[in-house]
Image: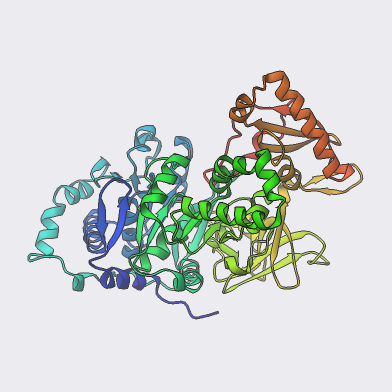
Amino acid sequence: MEEYKDFISFIEESIKKNWDLDALTDYEGSTLQYKDVARKIEKLHILFENAGVKKGDKIALCGRNSANWSVAFMATLAYGAVVVPILHEFKAEQVHNIVNHSEAKILFAGDVVWPTLNANEMPHLEGIIHIPDYSLLVSRTEQLTEAREHLNEFFGRKYPKFFRKEHVAYPNHPEANDLAMINYTSGTTSNSKGVMVPYRAMWSNYAFAVEVLGPHVKRGDAVISMLPMAHTYGMAFEFIFEFLHGMHIYYLTRVPSPKIIFKAFSEIRPHIVISVPLIIEKIIRKSVLPKLSTISMKVLLRTPIINQKILEKVRQQLVEAFGGRFYEVIIGGAAFNSEIEQFLHKIGFNFTVGYGATECAPIISYADWEVHRPGSCGVAAPRMEIKINSNDPHNEVGEIWARGANVMLGYYKNPEVTAQTIDSEGWYHTGDLGVMDEDGYLYIRGRCKNMLLGSSGQNIYPEEIEDKLNTLPYVSESIVIQKGDKLYGLIYPDYDEAQKAGLDNEALQAQMEQNRRDLNTMVNNYEQLSGIKLFTEEFEKTPKRSIKRYLYENTEI
């Protein structure tokens, strides 16, 4: 393994090198330059020190993406405490459980999250700090109360003239295997687990981004942060890499609806785009595919020369929709619809699909858009190995195993599950299924836990059936479940499109029955659906936008 480098020194170096550049902007709000970030970090360090926070203490963070969230995150690591980022979409009870389970000493809470929480349910906290202004919401020690009340006085005493870049020096110089962060998984199948992320994993993910993205972006370039930073995907590739690289990060502090996203893209014009499939699919389904589905357009698409011109124009429109100056769009976090992916590939759009897990902070595999292969999610990332646990990894589906610098230390206070997940040779058993081609490109087939068994022992991967089902008329999203030896499709239709087409409930039901028959001609006999059930509301999802399948496994048909 390439030698680990002190991760905290990169924070220090970036702040000094980029002192006068813009660093963090709350979209349509205020901007912090790197020097402002340094000053805020210093104040938080004075607060921690006077409040009795020790190296190794846990500090939790729960709130929407914002500049002050990022500052608190960096300040915690640079101080030598362990950061516990909590997804702000988690329900109050989950937040209470994570705070208690992690033994957090202090909680930073956002303005939307805080009113839903109950401090009495988190009895071991010494204090709760408001993320927008770092005011004290709750204090249970005199030390913390006094430290916050006299913070500006302490700061002025320490830096009587003014705070300069030579004052930036962080005491935390962690070793490779020191604990940096406990990240609780969203968990689509079971309860959240606290992933212990060491500094080597954070450094290795950063080094990966420097290698693959570094040549295409420079200091001062822009990125839009749309994904929750409390999730490792957004944290590593919309925040940490950019901050350490001297870039300018814009936070969409509100829920990123397509309308807000389009507005932000046109104004900010980011140099790199990190996304989950759902956002890309919505944009293409709503604004691109309908234009190509008209009768006149279908005729034109059959004419070879005009066909190429139309596809080039569509590509250009899509590039403009994302701001027009990005190097590539990186898609990850959940399965990508194959029809949309083939379409993007056909028009030559500069996108790629990666694969990762919280347990690897997060990257496992990736390939640049120019060498991306449709259906795959790249090759093993630097300092990582991938193995398919099957007799014939090229043709026979097996569990995906990963090993290397990015792999976690284990699950916090859960040695049993850790032992089941990381074997004696250091392989992390991902729980995902896949195959690998001769060149090392990884193709995911589904989750081990989701795999169904046909009546004659055949392996059925519901995700593959859903992928086809989702391409049929008026299907917005779907889940395939098993009842006895029969398969059924649960569908949330695109009611807006159905209404536009003048379909009432009866007609929609008839269309879905037709979809079922059409699907059954596209799949193997043992994968055919025996029935369909429609849902009137979207399926519940994790913050990563994966459907919580386990909630629907016992649906009555």
- In this image, 429 relative to 317: left or right? right
- At x 37%, y 44%, the residue is 253
Residue 344 placement: quadrant: bottom right
- In this image, 74 relative to 403: left or right? left
Rendering coords of residue 500 (x, y %): 60, 26
- In this image, 201 relative to 310: left or right? left
In the displayed orientation, state which residue is furthest to the left.
Answer: 161
Rendering coords of residue 318 (x, y %): 52, 52
In the displayed orientation, state which residue is furthest to the right.
Answer: 456
> Where is the C terminus found, in terms of image quarters?
top right
Question: Eyeballing the image, is 482 above or below 421?
Answer: above
- At x 55%, y 79%, the residue is 1
Q: Is residue 557 visible?
A: no
Instruction: Tell which of 350 and 161 is nearer to you.
Output: 350
Residue 381 placement: quadrant: bottom right
Instruction: Tell which of 2 and 49 is nearer to you.
Output: 2
Q: Is residue 344 visible?
A: yes
Rendering coords of residue 203 (x, y %): 46, 70
- At x 56%, y 59%, the residue is 359
Rendering coords of residue 66 (x, y %): 34, 49
